[in-house]
Amino acid sequence: MSEKKYEIDISKLTFEQLKKIRTYLKKLIDNGGSDLHVKANGIIRARINGNIVPFSGNILTHADALTLAKEILRGRYGEFIENKEIDFVYQYDDRNRFRVNIFFQTDGPSAVFRVIPMDIPTIDQMKYPAAIRTFTQESRGLILVTGATGSGKSTTLAAMVHEINMTKKKHIITIEDPIEFVHKDRGCIINQRSVGQDTLSFDRALRAALREDPDIILVGEMRDRETVELALHAADTGHLVFSTLHTIDAKETINRIIAMFPVDEQNRVRLSLAGVLKGIISQRLIPTIDNKRAAAFEILVKTPTIEKLINENRDYEIHSAIEKGREHYKSQSFDQHILDIYNSGTISKDKAKDYATSASDLELKMSGLNTGKVSKDDKKENISKIDEDIFELK
């Protein structure tokens, strides 16, 4: 099958379907939504504050969905037909852009439009944990941002790159699919490459990046073994590498990376990862009491203990090490941060438990048990008890 077979005559398009979708995109923007869902033989829906809500009562026909694909893709329509899905960025106006994925499903084409904020967020504006700024001060190693789709990984990476851009003089190369946040050169030179447009693949661009004098490399996603291998090599040869994975927490992230390799290579990869890893930021968005969403973070900061646990395949102890390192290293588990968010009155008890790593442990912490800390009153009570014991001995 050839893409040329599906070339379209743009002069014959009326762009009526695209005009209709633009009205829904405007509605999405006005309502502060994050995603617009367009489905053949379905109604238009949107995600607002984490919930899917209907935006229209009219069914989009199969023919209309195909026409929309032609109108928005134009010269790339043949690529869509050939590959059955396609990623790209749609510029709505000077202030609004969308990351778009169009794909085939049983009833025909569907599309999801994800809002891309034009203003790059800062670490201070997002009120990120202190460790995230600390990670931007690293000169080499691997820093991973993980979480489910839509959990804010791209926003966190953008804020970190912006922090480096404003405070350092470095060469940053980003490899993304597609490019979401567009960075302007400030203190740094920033070259942003889009997979499919500026390069053929992540691993190809990453291999080339090593010959392009970078200080920092951002790999939009570590999708396969070759990309992981190259990222580990880049981090090991003196570069600071940022990337993402779709994993739920720090422990699973480590396991996922190692599991990408054959059994006879896993010890080598484990040693390499333990050596270059600087930190893991895992994210979850939790519905709030006022119908918004709050970000909860698990932060792994690589310490001698963490490095030893990874080296010795004692991943089951990582969660405990993260919690114990909170005061000194600014690490934190999901449950520690979720408890903070709950105590601030932002989320309900039920939502806190729903998004916790261990709902039962979190409930104990909510009740004041199993916190690992002793209050001032408890200390006074313990001292009084010791005094009583001494008096009785006398």
Image (cartoon, rainbow, N blue to C red):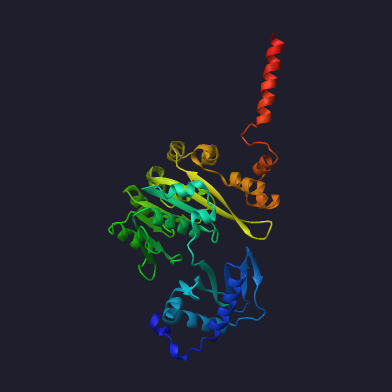
Query: What residue lies at 46% left-to-right and 66% top-to-bottom?
Result: 180
Question: Which residue is nearer to you in this view: 236 or 63?
Answer: 236
The picture quadrant where one finds residue 42 is: bottom right
Q: Answer above or below: position of 142 versus 48.
A: above
How many circles with numbers are drawn on the protein? 0
Question: Which residue is nearer to you in this view: 274 or 93?
Answer: 93
- How far across and how far down the image is residue 222, in percent? 43, 57
- How far across and how far down the image is residue 348, in percent? 69, 52
Q: Answer above or below: position of 108 versus 252.
A: below
Query: What residue lies at 40% left-to-right and 56% top-to-bottom?
Result: 166
Relative side of 139 to 352, left or right: left
Query: What residue lies at 69% left-to-right and 25% top-to-bottom?
Result: 381
- How far across and how far down the image is residue 175, in percent? 39, 62
Q: Residue furthest bottom?
A: 12
Q: Residue furthest top?
A: 394
The picture quadrant where one finds residue 216 is: bottom left
Q: Quadrant of the N terminus?
A: bottom left
The answer to whether residue 34 is seen in the rendering is yes
Q: Quadrant of the C terminus?
A: top right
The answer to whether residue 264 is seen in the rendering is no
Q: Answer above or below: position of 144 versus 370.
A: below
- How far across and how far down the image is residue 366, in percent? 68, 42
Query: What residue lies at 69% left-to-right and 15% top-to-bottom?
Result: 389
